Structure formats: C-alpha cells, structure tokens
Image (cartoon, rainbow, N blue to C red):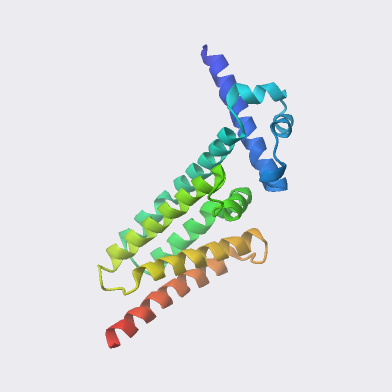
Amino acid sequence: MSGTRQASKIRTRNRLVRSAIRLLHRSGVTSLTTGKIASEAGVAQPTFYVHFEDMKALLNEVASQISATIITRMQPVRETVMSEPSRRTVREACEMSVRALVEDPRFADLYLRHRRDVDTPLGKRFGELTKMARAVLREELLRIYPEGELPQLDIHVDLIFGMTLGLIEAIVDRRVSDLDAAVDILADSIIAQVRSHKRAAAAA
C-alpha cells in the first residue's frame, strides 16, 4: 500500500473514532450504530467494516485512544510530586490530574459514565486506567511516606482518588467554574487529611 493510501486509511479510521466519541457523548452507547457512526464521519456504512471488525472493536479503539491521551497528559504528575514533596508540588499534581480529564470534557464525561461498566469494552479499558492511576498514587504516597509511616494507606488512596474524581465531575457538570480555586481546595484537603491522620497515629 502506498504512503498516500495508508495515510488516507489512517485519517478515515480516526474520523470514525472521533465520530463515535461525539455520538457517545451526545447520546450514549445504547444508541450507537455503525450507520450513525459512518454518517457522522461522512463515509458510507460499508467503510466502517473496512476499518473495524465490529462495534466492539471500535469501542475498544475509542477507549484505548481516550486512555492513552489521559495517560500522556498525566505523565508529568509523578515527576512533579517526587521532585520535591511540598504544598506547591501537591497542588501542581492536583492541577495536572484534573486538567488531564477536563481538557476535553467529552473524555471526562465518557470516563466518569463508563468506568464501572465492567462488561463493556469502554468499562474494561477505563477500569484498567483507574487501576493504574490508583497504583501510581499509592506508589507516590509510599515514596513520600515509607511503609508504616502513613497508616491505612489504601484508604488515603481511595479518598484522594475520590475527591479528585468528584471535582472533575463538578467541573464537567459546570457546578464549579473556578478551576484554580477548586484545585487549591483539593490540594489543601489532601494535605490536611494526610497530616491529620499522621498526627493522630503518632499520638496513639
């Protein structure tokens, strides 16, 4: 296949994926059909099957692309916190984590909607993303607070993860519009939570 034909094929495949993301965001997975996706992409329906075996294959590609984009955006988070654990770096990590999702509200909406759908291609891939994010957060906390120094570490991981997702949802739903103020409060809440528990454990 010539370079021009290959490039054209890649562009068409990406158009189908982007069309599926738009339709998923607007109408949900139950209303998704190959005909609607092809029409949204501006191609004939048989073209869909040139690029994807079936709807499951397309949804796997959608979930993979969204996850890869989020992971790429979040790569600097770990280096930021580990370079110098402080209020400033915790805040920077919070901001990067939030922006990784809200930069494209469609990605955030689809992730929040489907991350627990374990029987769907979207849910399975987003579940893997969630598991990875939790594992990275746990490792970061372990490096800052060696084993035993922060009791109930896994509870802290879930609380921090839950607070971050809650803030992302509030931003996507437009209940929160001041992202800077929201990230300040998130960072201070995380720091206060960890410090308070450390003091209580030390005094016990």
Relative to the observer, which residue lies in front, 195 or 34? 34
Residue 104, x across and y down, in percent: 60, 49
Query: Going 69% across and 39% down the picture, which residue do you hit?
Result: 32
Q: How many marks?
A: 0
Residue 93, x across and y down, in percent: 43, 60
Query: Going 36% across and 80% down the picture, which residue do you hit?
Result: 197
Tell me the quarter of the image containing the C terminus: bottom left
Return the residue found at the far bottom: 203
In which quarter of the view is residue 46 placed?
Answer: top right
Horizontal arrangement in the rendering, residue 30 relative to residue 111 (left or right): right
Relative to the observer, which residue lies in front, 159 or 183? 159
Query: Going 59% across and 53% down the picture, which residue do you hit?
Result: 108
Residue 73, x across and y down, in percent: 47, 48
Relative to the observer, which residue lies in front, 29 or 109? 29
Relative to the observer, which residue lies in front, 103 or 61? 61
Position above or below: 79 against 142: above
Return the residue found at the far front: 119
Horizontal arrangement in the rendering, residue 125 relative to residue 21 (left or right): left
Residue 203, x across and y down, in percent: 29, 88
Query: Going 59% across and 34% down the picture, which residue do you hit?
Result: 58
Position above or below: 171 against 2: below
